[in-house]
Amino acid sequence: IILHEILASRLKRPELLQTCAHVVDSGLPVVDPASGAVLCRAPAVGAEAVRAAILVADRALLAWKKLGPAARSRLLHAYADLIAENVDDLAVIMTAEQGKPVPEAKGEVEHGLEYVRWYAEEARRVYGQEWRLDAGRRILVQKEALGVAAAITPWNFPCSTLLRKIAPALAAGCPVLVKPASQTPLSALALAALWQEAGGPAEVFQVLVGDAQEIGQVLTESPLVRGLSFTGSTEVGRLLMRASAATVKRLSLELGGHAPFIVFADADMDAALAGVLACKFRNSGQTCVSANRLLLQESIAEEFCARLVPAVSALKTGNGFDAGVDLGPLIDEAAMAKVERHVADALARGASLACGGGRLTVPGNADHFFAPTLLVQARPDMLVAREETFGPLLPVLTFRDEAEALRLANATIYGLAAYFYSRDVARVQRVAERLAFGMVGVNTGRMSAEATPFGGVKQSGFGREGGHFGIDEFLEIKTLHLGL
Ligand code: ADP
């Protein structure tokens, strides 16, 4: 691969990108969202190569299962160590293709490798059960690798979303085929190169770069692929669910979200302010668990906004490689256009801008930067209050009492993450119970950890990643009836 100066001048080990894709048919241009420069052409595959890759994975299944948990655990630990050694390069690759500031990219790699360590350990804790049913009958319940697994990953967290799928799959004994988002294939290719460097068999972790629809179709149609783990939009999730019906695949879907961030009058306001800033503007708001709506109790709304506006305005937007940048570019023009559409719709329906509101020029860079934006007097009928925004835009809605807050918060087809701040213990219990979301942050804006299950309810999907729950997605249960 010929690398653009942006990568070539920063990477300590450019060979990490010298491809390990199984078969290379053509090249997919990878663009730096900040500068607009083409970073390189990544090796891409077509349908035939994907079919070949599935066969390779299927042939590797038995040996990978039989290798046993202890050996797989050692490999995963070695892999985690290598990722740790290459954190700087992986962060550079991510910033170049995804845009987030380098320290944030580094944080993501470090977070991602904790999943590898976690599942290196979890590999050794796949337990079955045994009991006597009646005289002459004994039951053994065994857990077995599901089989060949596919993972389709998004561009917003190119490293951690990939690792939290492949680590439990590999730990469980499943060869895995990964189709990364076409915007961010380089992180995936580098992670696969490191897997092989750690001594991992190339056949059990293959990266398929190319046309999403074409690759998706081959993966979903194949009866050899037994499971599909997907992170992305609800729209594509529905499509993959439909396509997987023909071969009745095990599915794990982590789809869109529309997180409410509720601040009650009894909240610790300093903590809530810090919480909403981190939760909303990390990754420029391109996060499925980002606060998408700020719900403020009427009595504190004015004071809260008065303090939030200067904090939001002070955030620095720029190229992710520059020092002191809080917000990088949005991933592409379509993402910019969506945020603009949400702002225009809200203004037309009576909201007003408290700060930001449009594109920002960052000298020497492309037109991919959106000012961190606060909209006040937002209402539930606005697009921004219904659709996932995926950008640095926060609408503020107000509520009178707890019942109204819950009604507003739950009025969405999504059910991924919700947040609320309150110091009233009884309220904390009530509200946590009534929020129809898979994850609830109580007095915190942080949500993801390798030790905890991550996933949604309603149209945000099903299945859980992380913790000991995550490995179950890649295991089958087999019941043995023994006439003993
Ligand atoms: P986003 O809107 O955040 O880009 P998508 O759901 O479009 O989210 O993308 C998430 C992942 O799904 C990416 O890897 C993308 O390439 C992939 N994808 C998109 N469309 C399809 C499809 N029809 N079949 C399979 N994968 C797809």
Image: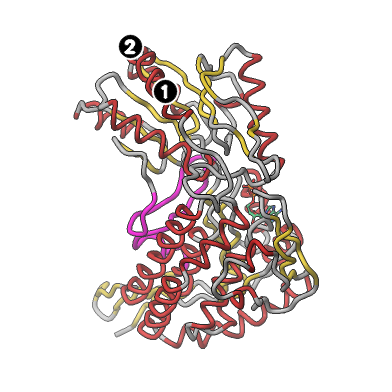
Q: Is mark 2 within 8 Å of ligand 1?
A: no
Going by the picture, which residue comes out furthest to the left? 425
* Image quadrant containing the N terminus: bottom right
Specify whether 469 is left or right of 40: left
Q: Residue at x 68, y 27 (%)?
A: 341
Above or below, 312 against 470 in this view is above
SS for callout 1: strand
Report if residue 457 lies within the magenta region: yes
* Render colour scheme: secondary structure
Residue 31 or residue 446, whichever sits in front: 31
The numbered dot on residue 295 is 1
Residue 480 percent across, percent down from the top left = 38, 77
Disc 2: which residue:
299
What distance separates the C-alpha of mark 2 from that of mark 1? Answer: 12 Å
Residue 301 percent across, percent down from the top left = 38, 16
Residue 171 or residue 459, whichever sits in front: 171
Span colored in magenta? 448-475
Where on the picture, by quarter, is residue 472? bottom left
Can residue 179 be spotted in the picture? no
Specify whether 268 is left or right of 205: left
Can residue 290 be spotted in the picture? yes
Specify whether 297 is left or right of 66: left
Where on the picture, by quarter, is residue 92? bottom right
Q: Residue at x 34, y 34 (%)?
A: 274
Q: Residue at x 73, y 64 (%)?
A: 210
Residue 382 percent across, percent down from the top left = 59, 21
Q: Residues within 10 Å of mark 1 (few under 14, many from 20)?
A: many
Q: Residues within 10 Å of mark 2 (few under 14, many from 20)?
A: few
Query: Mark 1 belongs to which amino acid?
Result: Leu
Magenta stretch, main secondary structure, is loop
